[in-house]
Amino acid sequence: MTDMPLLRRRGSAVTDAAAEECWIGFFDGVSYPVLVTNAERGIVFANQAACLLLGESRDALHGRPLHSLICCATAEDLSALDREAFATGTSSVERILPTSEGEGRFIVTRRPVGENIVMTFLDVTDLRQTEVTLREREVHLRGLLELHPVVPFSFAPDGTLADVSDRLAKLTGLPVDTRNLETWWAAMHPEDRA
């Protein structure tokens, strides 16, 4: 296998086959997707996880322009990210990428190695969906807190009484400490249960 320091020197005379053997040795067994591009932003290596993510074989990805895979990315966008990676040692950006299962959100991190760029992909699709769900829940809870003096009680998704205010005692005649009522049915006035 080719020694890694050869790949770190710009303009070194490492053959494509030797470089690919090196990339396979380093990245093929890792669990996250890795792509390696050359100076022209053509893909020179994709590990097994990247092939699964993109739903294409390594041979189909080899030589393909990177901007054809990344939605809304132009060659100029990628060039700017590459310049940043070479200047600072790394660059990260969040992108929507097509996957074999549709599309997903990924944080793409670029690191220069010689004249190549090694890109790793962190799937944040579920994280972003969770953030949206939590924001919606927060809006709901803030509204509940603002209306708390007005709302006599609230329920959990399973139908159990989640919260009781003083108004429930006034409306139903039940004592305020009746917070352990089993279901909403128990909170109803006896005449309304029929």
Image (cartoon, rainbow, N blue to C red):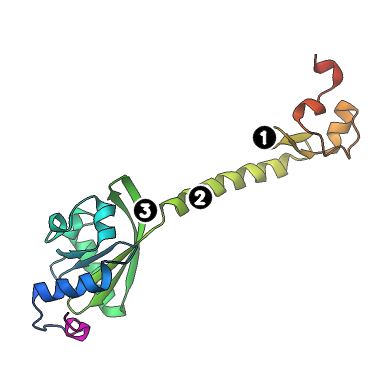
Of the residues shown, which amino acid type is indicated by label 1? Answer: Asp
Horizontal side of 83 relative to 148 (left or right) equals left
Which amino acid type corresponds to the residue marked 3 in the rendered image? Arg
Q: Quadrant of the C terminus?
A: top right
First in sequence: mark 1 or mark 3? 3
- Rounded to the nearest angstrom, the CA distance separating label 1 from label 3 is 32 Å
Q: Quadrant of residue 154?
A: top right
Check whether the beta carbons of the residues at disc 1 and disc 2 lie within 8 A of each other. no
Instruction: Categorize mark 2 by other alpha carbons within 10 Å: few (<14), some (14-19), many (20+).
Output: few
- Examine the structure image and report whether residue 176 is included in the region drawn in magenta: no
Residue identifier under label 2? 130
Query: What mark, if any, has residue 158 been given in the picture?
Result: 1
User: Which region is colored magenta?
Assistant: 1-9
Q: Quadrant of residue 77?
A: bottom left
Q: Residue at x 63, y 42 (%)?
A: 140
Q: Secondary structure at mark 2?
A: helix
Determine whether, in the image, residue 31 is placed left or right of residue 18.
right
Q: Is residue 151 above or below residue 20?
A: above
**Of helix, strand and loop, which one carries label 1?**
loop
SS class of the residue under badge 3?
A: strand
